[in-house]
Image (cartoon, helix red, strand yellow):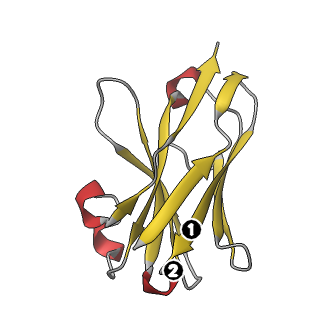
Amino acid sequence: QVQLVESGGGLVQAGDSLRLSCAVSGRTFNVRFLSWFRQAPGKERQFVAGIRWSGGNIYYADSVKGRVTCSRDRAKNTVYLLMSTLRPEDTATYYCAASVGAILSQREVPDAYNYWGQGTQVTVSS
């Protein structure tokens, strides 16, 4: 089993920055790919960014490219999502998801992931 715990969400103003954290525990050696998704009320869960757990390329959704940076601290088994120049449309619950398989071609598909965190709410006021 792999456990994911997100933190760092909150209420911010448009233009602000926020850093989310995803602490990974359990059988972390099984993890191959880890991503951030977000889901706004009434909308489908949307891929934001993803990273190979072993290191290497980082992938971003076009909608956030240039405003979001995903990084990983191997020593802390934690993945971060730094979001800048936040907009009201960034308001959503942000989830961390982990896959034990090689899902690079399906990284934007929620069903490709085996483990999910409970989510952290990000609200951006205008």
Amino acid identity at mark 1: Val
Could you say where residue 57 lies in the image, as x and y percent from the top left? Answer: 55, 76
In the displayed structure, would residue 110 be above or below residue 24? Answer: above
Counting every numbered tag in the picture gives: 2
Q: Secondary structure at mark 1?
A: strand
Q: Which residue is mark 1?
A: 24
Question: Quadrant where the C terminus lies?
Answer: top right
- Could you tell me if the residues under marks 2 and 1 are in contact, i.e. CB atoms within 8 Å? yes
Residue at 58% x, 31% y is 122
Q: Residue 52: horizontal and vertical position, in percent?
A: 50, 77
Q: Secondary structure at mark 2?
A: helix
Mark 2 is surrounded, within 10 Å at the Cα level, by few (under 14), some (14 to 19) or many (20 or more) other residues, namely some
In the visual, does 13 lie left or right of 109?
right
**Residue 61 seen from this side:** no
The foreground one among 33 and 25 is 25
Q: Residue at position x 65%, y 66% from top?
A: 78
Mark 2 and mark 1: span between their CA atoms? 7 Å
Residue farthest to the top, as pictured: 126
Query: At 44% from the left edge and 71% from the top edge, which residue is drawn?
Result: 2
Where the N terminus falls, by quadrant? Answer: bottom left
Q: Report which quarter residue 103 is drawn in.
A: bottom left
Answer left or right for 13 relative to 100: right
Image x and y of residue 88, in percent: 57, 21
In the picture of the structure, the residue carrying the numbered disc 2 is 28
Res 125 → quadrant: top right
Q: Residue at x 55, y 55 (%)?
A: 5
From the top left corner, tell me how far across and down residue 70 is, in percent: 63, 60
- Any part of residue 96 in sight: yes
Specify the amino acid type for callout 2: Thr
Specify the farthest residue to the left. 111
Q: Work out whether residue 91 or residue 97 is closer to the camera in this orientation and state it.
A: 97
* Label 1 CA crowd tier, 10 Å (few <14, some 14–19, many 20+): many
